[in-house]
Amino acid sequence: MNQRALFFRHVGLTSPQPMGIEVERAEGIYIYDKAGKEYTDLVSGVSVSNVGHRHPNVVKAIKDQADKYLHTMVYGEYIQTPQVQLATKLAEVLPGNIDSIYFVNSGSEAIEGALKLAKRATGRFNIVSCRNAYHGGTHGALSVMGDETMRNAFRPLLPGIRQIEFNNPEHLSAIDETTACFLIEPVQGEGGVVIPGKKYMQQVRQKCTDTGTLLIFDEIQTGFGRTGSLFAADWLEVAPDIICLAKGMGGGMPIGAFASTQEIMNLLTFNPVLGHITTFGGHPVSCASALASLEVILDEKLDIQANHKGDLFRAFLQHQAIKHIRGVGLFLAVELIPEVDVFQLIQVGIKHGVLLDPFLFCPNTFRIAPPLTISEEEIRESCRKIIAALDEMA
């Protein structure tokens, strides 16, 4: 069997028709297949490769740490320099007074840990989340996801979940003195990059404060410069009680985290001991990679540049098949006219050497979320490829 056949035979798949590009290597904003064809990556592994593929600083950090040690002990027992350095740096830049970071392996695991922490801290079990929200595929994360189609085959799920409309202040009455936490994406991702009003988010913060509800921000897609500041909480000027991180955190390596104040986080250390535990969370190589990636974002001001680069996409990407472009920073949603099928466009885009991706809960819309390192000329080139694909479909 060739590699493609072996992929379909032995690798667990997520859909009947995966994109099927056979990756040979990746560099900067480009992915190359076995035949040497170059693809402009406007997906970034779904907002993962914020500093581009194989950034030299990240690669060096990975190699340097691999020369020292890999996994040594389950999380939280040994003092490991990469974990300490990364946690200390994150404590400096995270919103509000968040200063204690619990490292995990993924975004879904970060959500799971945050939900447990909120229940432990409040003694409550009711949870409020939003419709059209995506929080991950594990059982608890699936329970708070805002799409019934994705959840229905796996019921029964967690009890005590209420879902409200995003950016609608009238629905905040669902948050009351029985609510452990309100879990919200500060910008809805799979809903199609839906941006809330600052006033609404301030109302959210006040409602949670008044009812003793912990406010959890899911910044798994929005974090680490994607929306024009290091975290969306920064430009929204609202600080959560708990924040969930992953994707763009690791510079291409698997890592996630949920973070809060030390006072709240320490509740997981007793009653019971090991209130949350992970074997590979905070892997030293992943932490070294994440620290290098964060330093690149800060040193090169990639977060600040994201707004201007997003404006360039809006300026260069003009076509009669495009109905609307919305978003913030380099987190954009391109809505097509009904006559153009987004899934067909993605396949035609592959032929033209540009990688696009649909949103789960926003029909006929594709994302633009390239590495934050993308240059103006690379943005122009990307838009030319998309326009060529749209022209072919006309």
Image (tube, helix red, strand yellow):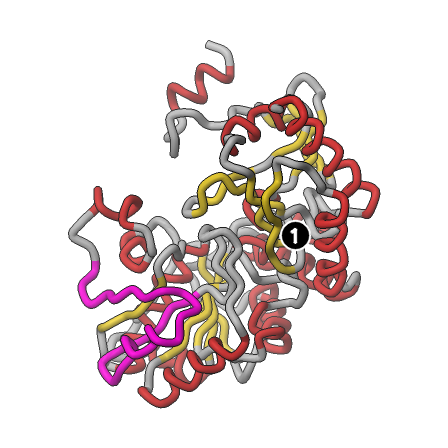
Res 88 seen here: no
Q: Which residue of the protein is positioned furthest toward the left in this rendering?
A: 156
Task: State the residue at coordinates (61%, 35%).
Answer: 321
Question: Left or right of 262: which side holds 161?
Answer: left
Task: State the residue at coordinates (56%, 57%).
Answer: 284
Q: Is residue 352 above or below residue 227?
A: above
Q: Is residue 331 magenta?
A: no
Q: Which residue is mark 1?
A: 50
Q: Is residue 47 above or below residue 269?
A: above
Q: In the image, what residue type sits under mark 1?
A: Asn
Q: Nearer the viewer, residue 57 or 280?
A: 57
Instruction: Please tell me in which quadrant of the rendered image residue 13 appears.
Output: top left
Q: Is residue 161 magenta?
A: yes
Q: Nearer the viewer, residue 206 or 92?
A: 206
Task: State the residue at coordinates (63%, 75%).
Answer: 93
Q: Is residue 180 above or below residue 189?
A: below
Question: Left or right of 109: which side holds 257?
Answer: right
Label 1 crowd (10 A; few <14 / some 14-19 / many >=20): many
Instruction: Please tell me in which quadrant of the rendered image residue 21 appears.
Output: top right
**Quadrant of the frame with the C terminus:** top right
The image shows residue 265 at horizontal and vertical percentages of 41, 78
Q: Which residues are magenta?
A: 158-184
The image shows residue 380 at horizontal and vertical percentages of 79, 40
The image shows residue 349 at horizontal and vertical percentages of 62, 28
Res 393 seen here: yes
Q: Secondary structure at mark 1?
A: loop
Task: State the residue at coordinates (57%, 49%).
Answer: 333
